[in-house]
Image (cartoon, rainbow, N blue to C red):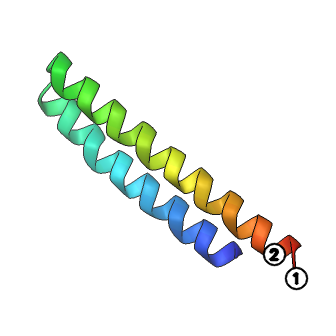
Amino acid sequence: MALKAIVGLVGIILVLGFLGVVVWKLPEIPLIVVILIGVAMMLYEYWEQLQVKEEEGDGS
């Protein structure tokens, strides 16, 4: 469980770093909005996956 959480955080940090460079080089409002929506969806999915794993662990 902890390994998946750490690897997920590393992935999120790498994606944010990559997208940060894109926003830095191309500061267009529509692009920033689309990236923010994508990042919000990514973070929500990560949070949901952590909750599902915790619930499965509690039932054992």
In the rendering, at what x and y percent does residue 47 appear? 61, 51
Question: Contact, CB < 8 Å: mark 1 with mark 2?
Answer: yes
**What's under tag 2, amino acid-wise?**
Gly
Q: Is residue 38 above or below residue 48?
A: above
Residue 19 is left or right of residue 10, and the answer is: left
Residue for badge 1? 60
Q: Is residue 53 above or below residue 21?
A: below
At 42% from the left edge and 43% from the top edge, which residue is drawn?
41
- Which disc number belongs to residue 57? 2
In the rendering, at what x and y percent does residue 17 appear? 34, 48
Instruction: Choose top left, top right, bottom left or bottom right for residue 24.
Output: top left
**What's under tag 1, amino acid-wise?**
Ser
At 63% from the left edge and 77% from the top edge, which residue is drawn?
3
Label 2: which secondary element: helix
Residue 57 vs residue 40, the one in the foreground: 57
In the rendering, at what x and y percent does residue 27 appear? 16, 22
Q: Residues within 10 Å of mark 1 (few under 14, many from 20)?
A: few
Q: Is residue 48 above or below residue 56?
A: above
Residue 32 is left or right of residue 27, and the answer is: right
